């Protein structure tokens, strides 16, 4: 086991070495939404005296003297980042726009937006009561932050190990992450931190009192989970050698379990009303033109400190007669100026990457931005945007996972614009959203005394030209939070 741990740690160290400090800085800045970026910039100003608020940048000649490698004509080419080894989940592409930032100091209004992420705080409170080492606590906090809104952990363990090495400087192994995850899975509500539907249900079953019925429920989920989700009643009864009554009783209990423990907790605590500041502003004009603006909110503009520049120039011109103290002062000044220029460059590249990504989304989803009709959204995945914007998929993923856009039709998270496609018998490509809308409409108009089952819904869509399988119907129905026919019956 020690040898395995060493191999994983070495692998994580090698991964972090593939990115320069400047690239790692850019990765971190890309993930920050506007409000957090403002805090990060102000913290950097306080930490580095060579950095100050202001519009006037140091001259290029001075910057060259300091070996900052900053290209004034194209500040985004010097640190061209390839981030394929550090994926999270999503993607986006490129374009031309009329303006990148608000002019005349105009700032977007802060718009209240309800966001169901408040269960993270509840989990962190439970974490405080655990006896963990400092490293284990840091890993636990990162795992909690990696849960989706349903309270499930969608990332793979190896991905989490890599990210812990990059973002937290912790080189750990699979065994340690699994151990910390098991602690989180003991938190309330039951099922939190599960990596699959099967694990989520089993975690909830573990907390039930022991009984013959519980054993049947556990066996169904452990051995026949796929058959359970597909409602293969006869197959399960035959293989488990139980009666139909025992099966029905077990299923009745299993359907009371919650496959989305995080979202239910969000409902309990009323989904804390949070303020979301959109990162992008997209205005659709009457003539059909679409104007994209990057909302920098109250993020201050940055420049190199004139005082530090002058001191550095003074030390540079007097190198021959420098004492040890003067040389130490010169190294300190140069280090701070280099760090300040690197931070300014990273902010500029962040802006360029964000605007490129959002413009690509607009280009591919132009009908939606013109009309505001959700059914006009085309199938689009991260690779589509990455190809169009000439960015790495992981870069697009980082942008789309944490950013919001304000449009004429409301505020949307960028991931709202992504969905898989579906090809009809005529070869027409449709968004999954359109199929879900048809499914929703069919259920809204059904006879509530005899509602459609999934097979009947599949047949209805098939008649409309969408040959969707029954289990696909079941998946979309669950995603729409629509219960089964039996539970819809009046």
Image: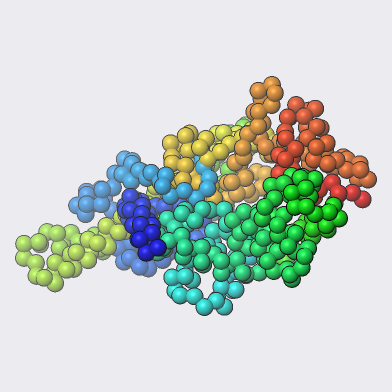
Please say whether residue 110 is visible from this viewpoint: no
* Rendering quarter of residue 269: bottom right
Residue closest to the far top: 426
Residue for point 68% across, 66% down: 206
How far across and how far down the image is residue 328, in percent? 17, 68
In the rendered image, is residue 415 in sight? Answer: yes
Count of marks, rendered view? 0
Q: Nearer the viewer, residue 132 or 426?
A: 132
* Quadrant in which the N terminus appears: bottom left
> From what the image shows, is residue 173 above or below residue 386?
below
Residue for point 83% across, 41% down? 453
**Is 471 situated above or below 325?**
above
Tell me: residue 91, above or below residue 339: above
Q: Which residue in the rendered view is the most extreme toward the front?
A: 241
Q: Nearer the viewer, residue 336 or 403?
A: 403
Q: Is residue 351 left or right of residue 485?
A: left
Residue 182 location, x and y as percent? Answer: 56, 66
Q: Residue at x 44, y 74 (%)?
A: 134
Residue 262, given in percent of the width and then of the height, sits at 66, 61
The one nearer the camera, 334 or 361, is: 361
Q: Position of residue 378 (x, y in %)?
A: 63, 34
> Which of the colour schemes (rainbow, by chain, secondary structure, one colour) is used?
rainbow
Residue at the image point whose x is 31% and y is 44% from the top: 78
In this picture, residue 293 sits left or right of residue 202: left
């Amino acid at each position: 086991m020690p040898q395995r741990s060493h191999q994983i740690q070495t692998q994580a160290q090698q991964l972090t070495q593939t990115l320069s400090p400047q690239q790692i800085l850019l990765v971190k800045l890309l993930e920050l939404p506007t409000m957090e970026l403002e805090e990060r910039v102000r913290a950097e100003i306080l930490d580095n005296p060579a950095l100050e608020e202001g519009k006037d940048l140091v001259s290029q000649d001075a910057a060259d003297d300091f070996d900052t490698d900053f290209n004034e004509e194209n500040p985004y080419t010097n640190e061209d980042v390839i981030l394929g080894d550090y994926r999270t989940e999503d993607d986006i592409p490129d374009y031309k726009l009329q303006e990148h930032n608000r002019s005349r100091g105009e700032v977007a209004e802060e718009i209240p937006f309800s966001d169901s992420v408040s269960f993270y705080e509840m989990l962190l409170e439970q974490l405080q009561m655990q006896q963990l080492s400092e490293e284990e606590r840091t890993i636990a906090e990162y795992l909690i932050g990696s849960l989706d809104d349903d309270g499930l952990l969608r990332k793979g363990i190896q991905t989490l190990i890599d990210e812990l090495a990059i973002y937290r400087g912790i080189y750990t192994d699979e065994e340690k992450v699994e151990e910390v995850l098991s602690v989180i899975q003991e938190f309330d509500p039951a099922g939190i931190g599960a990596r699959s539907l099967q694990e989520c249900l089993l975690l909830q079953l573990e907390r039930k009192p022991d009984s013959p019925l519980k054993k049947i429920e556990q066996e169904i989920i452990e051995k026949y989970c796929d058959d359970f989700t597909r409602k293969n009643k006869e197959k399960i009864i035959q293989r488990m050698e139980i009666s139909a009554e025992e099966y029905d009783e077990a299923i009745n209990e299993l359907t009371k379990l919650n496959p989305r423990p995080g979202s239910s907790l969000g409902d309990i605590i009323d989904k804390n009303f949070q303020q979301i500041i959109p990162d992008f502003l997209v205005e659709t004009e009457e003539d059909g033109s679409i104007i994209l603006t990057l909302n920098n909110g109250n993020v201050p503009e940055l420049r190199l400190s004139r005082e530090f520049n002058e001191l550095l120039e003074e030390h540079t011109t007097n190198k021959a007669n420098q004492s040890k103290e003067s040389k130490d002062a010169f190294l300190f000044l140069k280090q701070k100026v280099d760090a300040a220029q690197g931070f300014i460059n990273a902010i500029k590249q962040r802006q360029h990457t964000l605007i490129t990504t959002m413009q690509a989304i607009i280009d591919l989803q132009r009908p939606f931005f013109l009309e505001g009709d959700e059914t006009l959204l085309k199938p689009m995945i991260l690779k589509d945007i990455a190809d169009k914007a000439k960015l790495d998929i992981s870069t697009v993923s980082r942008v789309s996972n944490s950013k919001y856009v304000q449009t004429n039709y409301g505020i949307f998270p960028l991931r709202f614009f992504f969905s898989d496609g579906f090809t009809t018998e005529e070869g027409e490509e449709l968004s999954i959203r359109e199929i879900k809308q048809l499914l929703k409409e069919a259920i809204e108009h059904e006879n509530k005394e005899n509602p459609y089952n999934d097979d009947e819904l599949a047949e209805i869509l098939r008649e409309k030209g969408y040959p969707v399988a029954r289990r696909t119907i079941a998946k979309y129905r669950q995603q729409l939070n629509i219960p089964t026919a039996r539970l819809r019956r009046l």
